[in-house]
Amino acid sequence: MWWIPGPRAAQHLPAPGHVLLLDPTGHLSFAASYGLPPLRRGGFQGDIPVIDRSLTGSGRAQGRTQVRYRDGILGRELHTDTAPMDGYIVAVLVADSAPWRPFTPPIADTGPHSRSYICANCDEHYRSFDTACQRCRTPACPDCGRCACPPRTPGRTCPGCFMVHPPAMFPEVSDRCLDCS
């Protein structure tokens, strides 16, 4: 494995990439980035294919993989090399010019990939880079503007306008909302 120890390891990468130190569960204990967005300390990378192979095997693995940023957003594909170190896994990921391989052509920059969602309210399919709601972990739908959290007040559907309104919009003697009655 090609790796320069120390906190400045990422500065010695030949191309944009990351140097990661992962605990045995696949969480980041340390991450240094060069030319790519930084990864959050404590973030889970254990399900990333090359890192998963190293965690479940001897600690050594090579291949091409993507790292996971916040809210499950995947970064660009990178050449990856891992090795065990005192109970941890060290991973070096670079876009091209991987020193541990004789020839590494550049990987097309596909950019980050957003997660796909289906709105719990309007059933619209959408992709989003927005920050997710802290309660339901789903970003707001661009069509209806709501996340997957249940409404705070129960609503009723008006048979006149077919809209869901809060109970205060209905007179006691009518099943139609104030706008329709």
Image (tube, helix red, strand yellow):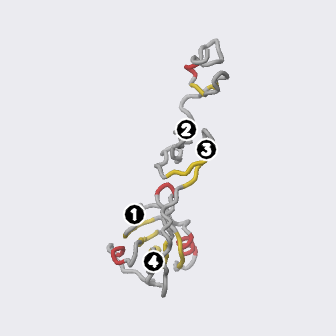
Give the alpha-carbon distance from disc 3 to disc 1, as whole Å: 32 Å
Give the alpha-carbon distance from disc 2 to disc 3, as whole Å: 9 Å
Q: Which mark is residue 3?
A: none
Give the alpha-carbon distance from disc 4 to disc 3, as whole Å: 38 Å
Residue holding disc 1: 38
Query: What is the secondary structure assignment of the residue under circle 2?
Result: loop
Give the alpha-carbon distance from disc 4 to disc 1, as whole Å: 18 Å
Query: What is the secondary structure assignment of the residue under circle 1?
Result: loop
N-terminal of the pair, mark 4 or mark 1, is 1
Query: What is the secondary structure assignment of the residue under circle 4?
Result: loop
Q: Which mark is residue 96?
A: 4
Query: What is the secondary structure assignment of the residue under circle 3?
Result: loop
In this view, the residue farthest toward the top is: 173
Residue holding disc 2: 144
Residue 17 higher or lower than 156, as above or below: below
N-terminal of the pair, mark 3 or mark 1, is 1
Residue holding disc 3: 124
N-terminal of the pair, mark 2 or mark 3, is 3
Residue 138, x across and y down, in percent: 53, 47
Specify the amino acid type for callout 3.
Answer: Glu
Left/right placement of residue 14 relative to residue 79 reads left
Q: Which residue occupies the foreground of this view, 13 or 159?
A: 159
Q: Residue at x 37, y 70 (%)?
A: 34
